[in-house]
Image: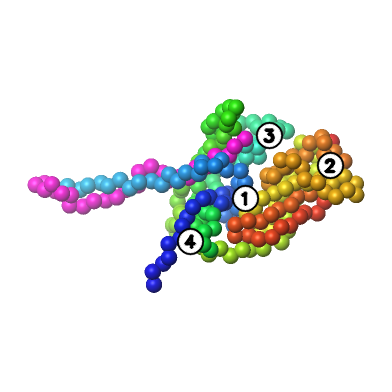
Amino acid sequence: MKNERSLAIGMAYVGVGVYPGTGVPAAAFEQITDIHEGSVVFNFAELTPTKIMIEGTDEPRWIVNRKGDVSSIEFAIPSPTVNDMIMFCGGTKTGEKWEEPNIAPSINMSVKMSTEPFEGKYTEYVIVNGSVSARISQAPTKTASELLLVKISKQIAVAADGTLKTPFTREVKDVVATPVTAVTINGTPKVGTALSAVPTPTQATGTYQWMKKTGSETPVDIAGATNQVYIPTSGDTGAKILVKFIASGSYSGTVTSTESAVVVA
């Protein structure tokens, strides 16, 4: 039976997880919610033929294909947070100041990408063991934001017994909406301290809306607070924080967290 062609178009999801070092991808992925439009690039290595020639002939006796450059994927994050910088560049933070490490760190991650659903199917790409490097690649201007360019280069994937596993997979999948059952808030509700929203399941794709509630009032949306991470401001002091998650792609449902404790200065 002939397989139907599935149209892979648009990037709906980019997620990373810590590579466990066992030849298989990370068990859980954290979605990178803000990817600069059109910045996802596949740099898969082109095979370089090595020709073995025989005297007296014009054609090669054998051709052996070898990989040239390392295969990698790239994407850019506009106006990265301190946590983005630490995740992909290493280093430390003091408040909202990122401090670059003196020695470039070795960061190994699994990365998963999936396309927009089309006619009930989507395409998923997974690099099992990727070496991460990142840099600020664009300065902010009046018409463009600062960009953090992240490059994840494919490495071999080795099981605990030394067996080589596949380093990369590409799979066409049926869209099966998985219900999202909850969203919780991690972190201390304090001005200047990051709060992060964690949906269940953690790899669910969707959008976020942070809200605050003062006294017995109905929670109201916080303007512009639509990322997975929210940092309370002085205007939130005395209020309780909530977050709403609206699932999309291969996930379904809308869930709202319980109220946090009161935000303190």
Q: Please tell me whether mark 3 or mark 2 is closer to you in this view.
A: 2
Q: Which mark is residue 172?
A: 4
Q: Are marks 1 and 4 in contact (CB under 8 Å)?
A: no
Residue under pointer 3: 93
Q: CA distance from mark 3 to mark 1?
A: 20 Å
Rendered residue at 64%/31% (across/down):
99
Q: CA distance from mark 1 to mark 4?
A: 21 Å
Q: CA distance from mark 3 to mark 4?
A: 40 Å
Rendered residue at 38%/46% (across/down):
45
Q: Determine crowd level at label 1: few under 14, some 14-19, many 20+ residues with C-alpha closer than 10 A.
A: some
* Residue in front for this viewpoint, 164 or 153: 153
Q: Please tell me whether mark 1 or mark 4 is closer to you in this view.
A: 4
Rendered residue at 69%/54% (across/down):
246
Q: Which mark is residue 30?
A: 1
The answer to whether one can see residue 237 in this image is yes
Question: Could you tell me residue 118's position as x and y percent?
Answer: 52, 59
